[in-house]
Image (spheres, rainbow, N blue to C red):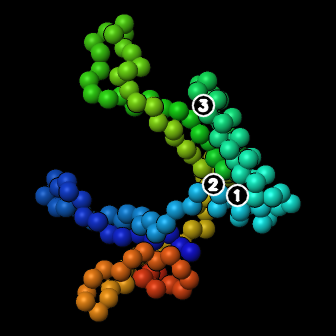
Amino acid sequence: MPVLYKTIQSTMKTKNSDKLYHPRTVYVGSVNTEKIAREIAEYSSLSTGDVKNSIDNLVTVMTRHLQSSEVVTLDGLGTFRLAMKSRGKGAKTKEEVSAAQASLQVHFSPASTRNSDRTVATRSLVTGVKCVLYKPETTDSGNSGGGNSGGGDGGIEDDPLG
């Protein structure tokens, strides 16, 4: 299934007082660890329980390393790191700075390969993605339909840029 997007208009105006339009991803569902474990088990000799246990252990081990100020790289997936984002005003002196001034976030960068000229050749998870415009189906009364969660391509239209 392709990545779906919709068009939104910015609330902020440009220097010319225009409110520009931008694409935004449309999410039509979610998956949890159990579903991922079942799907991985289909590709391996492991049971769903074994895979789920491995995923749970991966999260535990990654958490321990991230909380030890280490960057975690999973080959073929990407790199995870903790980053601090300042909230509010800064301090006037170095001595007044504290961790309470920031919130912690996990940053993820998909794995990538580079060409000899250092340009990005491929980015794991996004290479080969096809994007299409999401057009919700309408009912006879004109109400908007739900998300597109099944087969077929109802509600989507090819994007010439995708």
On screen, residue 42 versus residue 153, left or right, reads: right
Residue under label 1: 37
The residue positioned farthest toward the left in the image shown: 17
Marks 2 and 1 in Cβ contact (< 8 Å): yes
- Location of residue 67 (image quadrant): top right
Q: Quadrant of the N terminus?
A: bottom right
Residue positioned 46% across, 69% down in the render: 28
Towards the viewer: 93 or 43: 43
Decide: is 106 above or below 96: below
Q: At which x and y percent is residue 23? A: 36, 65
Q: Answer above or below: position of 100 versus 72.
A: above
Identify residue for label 3: 66
Q: Residue at x 61, y 34 (%)?
A: 63
Q: Which mark is residue 33?
A: 2
Circle 1 crowding by C-alpha within 10 Å: few under 14, some 14–19, many from 20: many
User: Mark 2, residues whose alpha carbon is within 10 Å: few (<14), some, or many (≥20)?
Assistant: few
Q: Position of residue 102 (x, y in %)?
A: 38, 26
Q: Nearer the viewer, residue 86 or 136?
A: 136
